[in-house]
Image: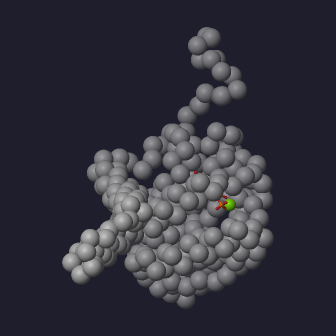
Amino acid sequence: MTTVRTSVVVPCFNESEVIGAFHEALVAALEPTGATFEICYVDDGSDDRTRAHLKDLAAADRRVRYTSFSRNFGKEAAMLAGLRMAQGDVVVLMDADLQHPPDLIPRMLELHRHGYDQVVARRDRTGEGMVRTSLSQAYYRLVRRFMEVEVVDGAGDFRLLSRRAVAAVLSLPEANRFSKGLFSWIGFDTVSFTYTNVRRAAGRSKWGGRRLLNYGIDGLLSFNSRPLRLAIHTGLWLLLSALAYAAWIVGNAVVSGVDTPGYATLITAIVGIGGIQLVTLGVIGEYVGRIYHEAKRRPHYVIRETDETATAQPDPSVRGAAWSK
Ligand code: UDP
Ligand code: MG
């Protein structure tokens, strides 16, 4: 059949409960395709036994490679490391918790053979809480209005990228990586299909409400400068209405004598304008913060070890052992 070399990139953070099952399912899905493949695990600084598991997998199977971070750098950094590691002509990105069913990979490879550079598996929202679904939908509506790139509801990071698409993603240097936006920004022929959402097989989701909110803000801000524009527009309209109001007061005073009660309007105006100024400052601050962050040009992550450099690591269960000798 095909000889396309496939790399599967899997970011893992505290996934020791599920990683074994995931690996079996993945290999079972990949072997029948007849494609040569490699699996690139990235351990995102897990503090459970994930790293040890990956090490064992890599020792047992030459098709398995891994990189381990010195601490938790976040999924975006882990995906970046995985993309850098991957050597295949085709790269599939997926989660370790079996929420991205490995048996969809053959279908993705098939679509890639039809010439698509990006194949996206979109999940529907089966089994998700009402509140979360409606919040996400509202968010995507907002994003569609504001963002210069298109981000599709349910299209997560489960996708296949061709070699040139990977090269394009890797050529984007920004420190603040919002993959959903980056994938859309690079373009190329993209196709997507929908699958039924699956619950996480074991372990816990790392995305609490606060983390999701921050992720949402990142997404909105990292792809456009429209919030700044919006602040300017609001400011202009306020200025105009204030001028009109002032003209009205002056006119009133001239026509019908002095009559300007209204500390209420005054307070309202002060508080209103103060609020808008604060929001605007916040928006500007966010952008300045991002510039500061980018300007430092720090690496996206620090590597503790890879399958090539792996050495004996201190076993956390025998604390202080190194000193007791
Ligand atoms: N993940 C990661 N670093 C993190 C958080 C998550 O590498 O800081 C990985 C995690 O191991 C999993 C994937 O990203 O493979 C998706 O995470 P999770 O299942 O917690 O997210 P959800 O499916 O709830 O969106
Ligand atoms: Mg998950």
User: Is residue 316 shown above or below 110?
Assistant: above
User: Is residue 84 shown above or below 322?
Assistant: below
Q: Residue furthest left?
A: 254
User: Is residue 100 shown above or below 189?
Assistant: above
Residue lying at 78% horizontally and 70% vertically, measured from the top left: 127
Q: Position of residue 216 (x, y in %)?
A: 52, 64
Residue lying at 67% horizontally and 82% vertically, measured from the top left: 194
Residue lying at 59% horizontally and 48% vertically, measured from the top left: 43
Viewport quadrant of the N terminus? bottom right
Query: Can residue 38 be seen in the rendering of this structure?
Result: no
Q: Residue furthest front?
A: 257
Image-based side of 259 in relation to 84, left or right: left
Q: Position of residue 303 (x, y in %)?
A: 48, 43
Q: Residue furthest top?
A: 325
Determine the image quadrant of residue 31: bottom right
- Nearer to the camera, 136 or 174: 136
Q: How is the image coloured?
A: one colour
Image-based side of 219 in relation to 132, left or right: left
